[in-house]
Image: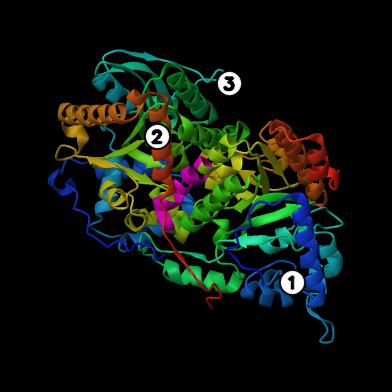
Amino acid sequence: MPGKNFARREIRPGFLQKNPKEAEPEKEVQLKDKVPAKDKDKDRDKDKEHKDKQPLNSPAWERVLLARHVERPHALDFIGALCGEFVELHGDRHYGDDAALVGGIASFEGRTVVVLGHQKGRNTKENITRNFGMPRAEGYRKARRLMLHAAKFKLPLLSFIDTPGAYPGKESEERGVALAIAENIMELCRLPVSVIALVTGEGGSGGALAIGVADRMLMLENSVYSVASPEGSAAILWRDASQAPAAAEAMKITAPDLHRFGIIDEVIPEPPGGGHTDRLALMATVREVLNQHLNELEQRYTNQGEAGVRAMLDARYEKYRKIGQWAELSNFSEN
Amino acid sequence: MKELFKRTPRQGEAEQKAAGAKQKAEAEANGPQPKFTWNKSHGAADAGSPQGKQEEREKPVAHSEIPDNLWTRCTACKELIYTKEFENNKKVCHKCNHHARLTARERLAFLVDENSFEETNAGLITGDPLLFTSLTEASYPDKAAETRRKSGVNEALTTGFAQIQGLPVGVAVCDFGFLGGSMGSVFGEKLVRLVEEAVRRDCPVLTISASGGARMHEGMFSLMQMAKTTASLNRLGEAGLPHISLLTDPCTGGVFASYASVADVILAEPGALIGFAGPRVIEQITKQKLPAGFQTAEFLLENGMIDQVVPRKELNTTIACLLKLYRVAATRRNNISANQLQQEVSHAW
C-alpha cells in the first residue's frame, strides 16, 4: 500500500508584519531561558554565525512566537471566560499539587464539564509558581484523577493545551513523569465520556498529549503542536538549538499543516494579529466551536447509552489507529 | 524459508508440538539453518559479524592470521573478552556484569525458543510524511534507506510471534542501531498490527524497548504513535491478555512515556538507562547535578516505577514463569478442564 503523498503548500504568511508592536527581541531572550536548549554558551557563539542563515520570513516561526506571546490567554483565562461557574480541584492525592496543570469542575453552556489545562504565568513570579507551564508527575496524576472524576459522573472533558512540554527535571524522573504521561494516554483512550482538546498556545510533545487524546482535536489558528519544541528538535537533529526557526518550518507544526495531515480536526480562526488582540472575539468563537462539537458528540454518542459510548470509543481508536504513513515492500530484500 | 505473513490458526498444544517436531525434522534434513525465519538480508548478515561495525572498531590490533572478532572489549570496564565466551554469556561482561546493547536479532536469539520466531510485517518501510527538509544531512528517505542497508532490518521495531519455553507470545523488539530505535509511523503501525493480531490469537504480548523516543523526521506523526500504540494495548488489556514490558539500555522519551510504561509487568535489565529526558538535558535545563546511578533500572526500582530488575541470563525463566501464571489463570477462567490445563502447561512446569 503506497503511502499518501502530501503536497507541499505554502503556509499563509503570519500577520506579525502588520503588528509592529510585537516585542520580538524581548521574547527571544525570555525563550532562550526556558528553552530546553543544549549548550547555551556554545549557542551564544554560534548565534552570530547563524543569524545570517536563519530564514528571514518563516511563517511557522512567527506562529511559534505568537503561540508563546506573553499576552496570549492561558487555561484559566479560557475557563474564566467560557465557564459560568468553576471550582478548581487541587492535588493528585498521592504527592502534591502542581500549579502548572490546573483543572476542576465547571459549567459550560448549560452542562457540567470537567476542565483541564496547562497554566503558564505572565511574569517571573507567576512563571516560577506555574513552572512555565511544565507539569511534573503530580500534575499528570491530578489530571488523571479528574479524568476518572469525569468518567464517574459522566461529564464531558474539555482540555486546554499550552505547554512547552513536561518538566524534564530530577524530581520529575524520581516521581515517574513518563509513567504518569503513559497512564494518562491510556486513560484517555478508554475514557467513556466525550473528550475535546484544544491547543491554545504551544502543544509540546508528550506533555501535551497526556491531556490531548481526544474525540475532537482542535487548534487555535496561531497555536503550534510538535513532537519536540523547535529548539529541542534543532538540537536533536542538527546539534544546534539556534536553528529553531528552520526546525519549526521543517517539522510542520502549525495548525493548518496538521489539519492537512488529518492529525487535528479543526482550526479555530483567531482575530487578526493574534488571539490576544481581541479576547472577546476569540472567546466567542471558541465557545461556539466547542459547543457545536459537544452537541454533535452528545447527539451521536453519549445520548445513545452504552452502545453509543462504545461507538465513541471505537471511533476514537480508529481516529488514532489510522495516523501514519508507510510503504509495504512486497519483496523485502530491497537492496 | 517460512512464509512471512503466515497466519497460523490457533492450534492445540499437541498440534503445535507436532508441528515443532516436524519443523525440526525438516531442519535437520536440510542441514544447518539460521536460527530464525528471517528474510534474506538477515540470513546473509548472519554469516558475518552479528555486531557489525562497533565490534570491528573495538577489536584490538589483530595478527593477520587471527580471525576477526576473536576478542571483544567490554565498553564499560574495557576488559578483553573472548568473543565466543561473550556471546555464550549473552553479551554480558564476565568481569563487570555490563549488559551490552543487542540488535533485535541477537535479543530474540538470546530470549525465545529456537526456530520459534515467525516475523510479521517485516516489509513495512517508512514514508516521508512531512517531506522533511534537513539542513545538514541527506533526505529522510535516503537516510532511512541507508540505515536499512547498514542494519539489515527494515525498521527500528521487529515484530512477530514466538514461544518462550513453549509458551506462545507476541514479541516486539526495538533495535537501537536503527535511527536510535526511534518511533515513527512504521514502528507504531507494526506494533499495533502485532497487538491486534495477538488479540485475535489470544496471545500475550512482550515488548522489548530500547529507544531514544519519537522520530523527529516524522514530526507529529511520531507523537501520535504514542497514542496509537497505547490505545492498542488498551484493547489487549480489555481482552484479558497481559502485556509484559522489558526496558533495556537505553530507553527514553516517547517510548518510555507511552506503550512501554502501560504494561501489566515492567521489567528492566541491570544498569539500563531509563528516563523521560536524557541526563544531559536535565543537567542543562535545571542546572541540577545528577547523582551517580540516576535514571538506571535500579533507580527506577527503588522509586517504585518498575517491578523487577532482571539479569539477562534470568530473563527467559522470569518471562516464561509470568506467561505460565497468566496462562493458568486464563485457562481456569475459561473453564477448561483440569485435564486440558494439565496438558497445556505440563511440559513447561
Expressed as whole percent of the image width and height from the top left, the position of residue B202 reads 63, 44
Identify the chain of the residue marked 3, using the numbered disc in the image.
A
Task: Locate residue A327 relative to residue B194 in the image: left or right.
Answer: left
Label 2 lies in what chain? Answer: A
Q: Residue drawn 80% across and 57% down?
A: B92
**Amino acid, disc 1:** Pro
Alpha carbons under labels 2 and 1: distance apart: 46 Å
Which residue, given by chain and number where applicable, does mark 2 sit on?
A311
| Image quadrant where one finds the C terminus of chain A | bottom right
Residue A2 visible in this rendered orientation of the protein: yes
Residue B89 vs A18, above or below: the answer is below
Q: Nearer the viewer, mark 2 or mark 1?
A: 2
Placement of B170 over or under A315, stated as above or below: below
Q: Amino acid at mark 2?
A: Ala
How many numbered discs? Answer: 3
Residue A19, how many percent across, how many down? 15, 43
Q: Which residue is mark 3?
A: A95
Q: Nearer the viewer, residue A136 or A209?
A: A209
> According to the image, label 1 marks what residue?
B34
Q: Of residues B237 and A45, which is closer to you in this image?
A: B237
Rendering quarter of residue A7: bottom left
Q: Residue at x 83, y 40 (%)?
A: B342
Q: Residue A11: x percent and y percent?
A: 22, 55
* Residue type at numbered disc 3: Tyr
The disc at residue B129 is: none
Q: Secondary structure at mark 3?
A: loop
| Residue B285 locus on image (x, y percent) | 51, 41
Measure how far apart labels 1 and 3 are at the Cα level: 52 Å
Which span is picked out in magenta? B218-231
| Cα gap from disc 3 to disc 2, whole angstroms | 36 Å
